[in-house]
Image (cartoon, rainbow, N blue to C red):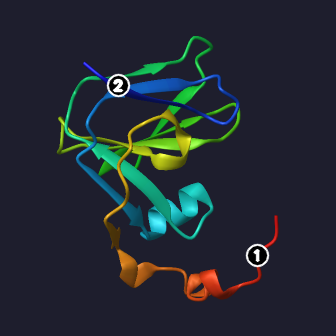
Amino acid sequence: MKYAEGKCYCEKVAFKVATPATWSAHCHCTQCQKIHGAAFVTWAGFETDDWSIDDKEKHFTVFNSGKAARGFCNNCGSSFFFKYKDSPAYVFFALPNFTQGPDYMPTENIFYDNHAPWIENIFELHKKN
Protein backbone atom coordinates (compact mmCIF):
# COMPACT_ATOMS: atom_id res chain seq x y z
CA MET A 1 0.00 0.00 0.00
CA LYS A 2 1.24 3.50 -0.86
CA TYR A 3 0.65 6.45 1.44
CA ALA A 4 0.62 10.22 1.13
CA GLU A 5 2.09 11.91 4.20
CA GLY A 6 2.09 15.33 5.79
CA LYS A 7 2.67 17.43 8.87
CA CYS A 8 1.45 20.55 10.58
CA TYR A 9 3.59 23.71 10.49
CA CYS A 10 5.53 22.95 13.72
CA GLU A 11 5.84 19.27 12.68
CA LYS A 12 4.56 17.99 16.04
CA VAL A 13 1.54 16.33 14.37
CA ALA A 14 1.96 14.12 11.32
CA PHE A 15 -0.54 12.15 9.25
CA LYS A 16 -0.59 9.53 6.56
CA VAL A 17 -3.37 8.33 4.31
CA ALA A 18 -3.62 5.49 1.82
CA THR A 19 -3.53 6.64 -1.79
CA PRO A 20 -4.76 7.35 -4.30
CA ALA A 21 -6.63 10.54 -3.63
CA THR A 22 -10.01 10.49 -5.37
CA TRP A 23 -10.92 14.16 -5.24
CA SER A 24 -9.39 17.62 -4.77
CA ALA A 25 -10.91 21.09 -4.86
CA HIS A 26 -10.61 24.65 -3.64
CA CYS A 27 -13.31 25.15 -0.98
CA HIS A 28 -14.73 28.66 -0.65
CA CYS A 29 -17.24 27.94 2.13
CA THR A 30 -17.42 30.43 4.98
CA GLN A 31 -16.43 27.77 7.54
CA CYS A 32 -13.16 27.05 5.73
CA GLN A 33 -12.52 30.78 5.30
CA LYS A 34 -12.95 31.48 9.00
CA ILE A 35 -11.20 28.39 10.35
CA HIS A 36 -8.18 28.75 8.05
CA GLY A 37 -8.14 32.54 7.90
CA ALA A 38 -7.88 32.38 4.12
CA ALA A 39 -9.96 33.05 1.03
CA PHE A 40 -10.23 29.33 0.33
CA VAL A 41 -8.73 25.98 1.36
CA THR A 42 -7.52 23.34 -1.05
CA TRP A 43 -8.51 19.86 0.10
CA ALA A 44 -7.51 16.40 -1.11
CA GLY A 45 -10.10 13.69 -0.47
CA PHE A 46 -9.49 10.00 0.04
CA GLU A 47 -12.11 7.27 0.00
CA THR A 48 -10.49 5.11 2.66
CA ASP A 49 -10.48 4.39 6.35
CA ASP A 50 -6.73 3.65 6.13
CA TRP A 51 -5.32 6.85 7.59
CA SER A 52 -3.65 7.82 10.84
CA ILE A 53 -2.55 10.77 12.93
CA ASP A 54 0.86 10.60 14.65
CA ASP A 55 0.58 12.81 17.72
CA LYS A 56 3.10 11.78 20.37
CA GLU A 57 2.81 15.07 22.30
CA LYS A 58 -1.03 15.23 22.17
CA HIS A 59 -1.35 18.41 20.08
CA PHE A 60 -3.97 17.14 17.60
CA THR A 61 -7.32 18.65 18.54
CA VAL A 62 -10.69 18.10 16.91
CA PHE A 63 -13.35 20.77 16.60
CA ASN A 64 -16.78 19.31 15.98
CA SER A 65 -19.10 21.61 14.05
CA GLY A 66 -21.99 19.15 14.29
CA LYS A 67 -21.76 18.25 10.61
CA ALA A 68 -18.06 17.51 10.51
CA ALA A 69 -14.91 17.07 12.53
CA ARG A 70 -12.09 19.49 11.78
CA GLY A 71 -8.64 18.71 13.14
CA PHE A 72 -5.79 21.05 13.89
CA CYS A 73 -2.54 21.30 15.85
CA ASN A 74 -3.09 23.18 19.09
CA ASN A 75 0.63 24.08 19.20
CA CYS A 76 1.05 25.90 15.87
CA GLY A 77 -2.59 26.30 14.82
CA SER A 78 -2.34 24.43 11.52
CA SER A 79 -5.80 23.30 10.45
CA PHE A 80 -5.43 20.34 8.12
CA PHE A 81 -8.08 17.65 8.71
CA PHE A 82 -11.75 17.36 7.78
CA LYS A 83 -14.21 14.48 8.05
CA TYR A 84 -17.98 14.53 7.58
CA LYS A 85 -19.88 12.66 10.28
CA ASP A 86 -22.11 10.91 7.73
CA SER A 87 -19.23 9.75 5.47
CA PRO A 88 -17.25 7.26 7.54
CA ALA A 89 -15.00 6.07 4.70
CA TYR A 90 -14.03 9.50 3.34
CA VAL A 91 -11.36 11.78 4.82
CA PHE A 92 -9.89 15.10 3.66
CA PHE A 93 -6.52 16.71 4.32
CA ALA A 94 -5.46 20.25 3.36
CA LEU A 95 -3.20 19.98 0.32
CA PRO A 96 -0.51 22.44 1.56
CA ASN A 97 0.26 20.19 4.56
CA PHE A 98 1.44 17.23 2.47
CA THR A 99 5.17 16.52 2.45
CA GLN A 100 4.82 13.49 0.18
CA GLY A 101 2.03 13.02 -2.37
CA PRO A 102 -0.81 12.82 -3.10
CA ASP A 103 -0.02 14.02 -6.65
CA TYR A 104 -3.61 14.97 -7.36
CA MET A 105 -4.47 18.40 -8.73
CA PRO A 106 -7.68 20.26 -7.77
CA THR A 107 -10.41 19.86 -10.36
CA GLU A 108 -13.01 22.35 -9.15
CA ASN A 109 -14.04 25.23 -6.91
CA ILE A 110 -16.77 24.34 -4.42
CA PHE A 111 -19.10 26.74 -2.59
CA TYR A 112 -17.87 29.39 -5.02
CA ASP A 113 -20.96 31.53 -4.37
CA ASN A 114 -19.29 32.34 -1.03
CA HIS A 115 -15.90 33.21 -2.52
CA ALA A 116 -14.08 36.23 -1.13
CA PRO A 117 -14.55 39.10 -3.61
CA TRP A 118 -11.04 40.38 -2.94
CA ILE A 119 -9.48 37.41 -4.77
CA GLU A 120 -11.12 38.18 -8.14
CA ASN A 121 -7.95 39.74 -9.56
CA ILE A 122 -5.41 37.60 -7.70
CA PHE A 123 -3.36 36.71 -10.78
CA GLU A 124 -3.30 40.28 -12.06
CA LEU A 125 -1.63 41.67 -8.92
CA HIS A 126 2.08 42.53 -8.78
CA LYS A 127 4.20 39.49 -7.97
CA LYS A 128 7.03 39.80 -5.42
CA ASN A 129 9.35 37.18 -3.97
* Residue at mark 1: 127
Indicate whether 41 appears above or below 103: below
Mark 2 or mark 1: whose residue is earlier in sequence = 2
| Residue at image point 20% right, 32% down | 48
Do residues under tags 2 and 1 come within 8 Å of each other at their CB atoms?
Answer: no
* Residue at mark 2: 3
Image side of residue 23 versus residue 123, left or right: left
| Residue at image point 22% right, 27% down | 49
Of the pair 112 and 120, the residue shown nearer to us: 120
Q: Amino acid at mark 2?
A: Tyr
Give the x, y percent position of residue 92: 35, 44
Which corner quadrant of the image does residue 127 belong to? Answer: bottom right
Q: Which disc number belongs to residue 29?
A: none
Q: Residue furthest top?
A: 56
Q: Secondary structure at mark 1?
A: loop
Which corner quadrant of the image does residue 36 belong to? Answer: bottom right
Q: CA distance from mark 2 to mark 1?
A: 35 Å
| Residue at image point 18% right, 43% down | 87
Q: Amino acid at mark 1?
A: Lys
Q: Secondary structure at mark 2?
A: strand
